[in-house]
Image: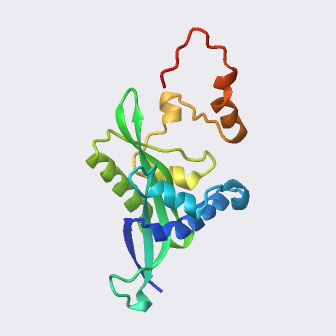
Amino acid sequence: MGFRYVVRQSKPEDCGSILRLIKELAEFEGEDPDRAVQNTEEDLQDDCFGDHAYFRCLVTEAISDADHADKAERGTVVGYAMYFCAYSAWIGKLMYLEDLFVQPAHRGQGLGKALVCKVAQIGSEKGCKGMQWVVQDSNNSARQFYNRLDAVDMTATDGWRVMGLRGENFSHVANSLTNLETNNIQWLC
């Protein structure tokens, strides 16, 4: 059975499908999706749509050739690219690719490349000077995919390490100002 594919901006009604794919990605990366994925469909709707959206998302729909589907008919969401604008003090505007995932059954059709290229085009239209993302060191197929796009492994070339705070550690740091001795600091924010 063959498919044709549609790449488009996500809509609020896609959030259930996007969450399903996020969980598939977590499982693909060796995580327990029920433990690792804290987002809900409602979180995605709140954070992707509206005047103050935190991110945007492209989706790829697969429409079966057997259905002889009308071009307006919706297919099954089989891939997504989640992205947002970021800023580098040294470079300026950047596009950040948070997630890229295409279900294994639909790989090899050029969908991943199409999604990355579209995110790059959106970034370019917004005046971004580059695009960044992280990839698991153990995900050789993803690293090979990005190498074919001539992506640069910035860990190897620039020596940067990705750092972060999550969960209790994040809460602890966020709440530590109340215990911080700041006699010589005046807070205006």
> Residue 107: in sight, yes or no?
no
Please name the residue shown 44% across and 66% down the image: 59
Q: Position of residue 130 (x, y in %)?
A: 36, 40
Q: Splitting the image into 4 quarters, where does residue 91 fall? A: top left
Q: How many marks?
A: 0
Compared to residue 4, the image places residue 24 above or below, namely above
> Residue 119: in sight, yes or no?
yes
Q: Position of residue 138 (x, y in %)?
A: 63, 48
User: Is 74 placed left or right of 106 in the picture?
Assistant: left
Work out whether residue 137 or residue 13 is closer to the camera in this orientation and state it: 13
Q: Position of residue 77 (x, y in %)?
A: 49, 72
User: Is 61 placed left or right of 71 in the picture?
Assistant: right
Please name the residue shown 43% across and 69% down the image: 60
Q: In this view, which residue lies farthest toward the top?
A: 184
Compared to residue 127, the image places residue 176 above or below, namely above
Work out whether residue 23 or residue 2 is closer to the camera in this orientation and state it: 23
Please name the residue shown 53% across and 59% down the image: 44
The coloring applied to the image is: rainbow
Q: Position of residue 126 (x, y in %)?
A: 29, 46
Please name the residue shown 33% across and 47% down the image: 123
User: Is 139 placed left or right of 172 in the picture?
Assistant: left
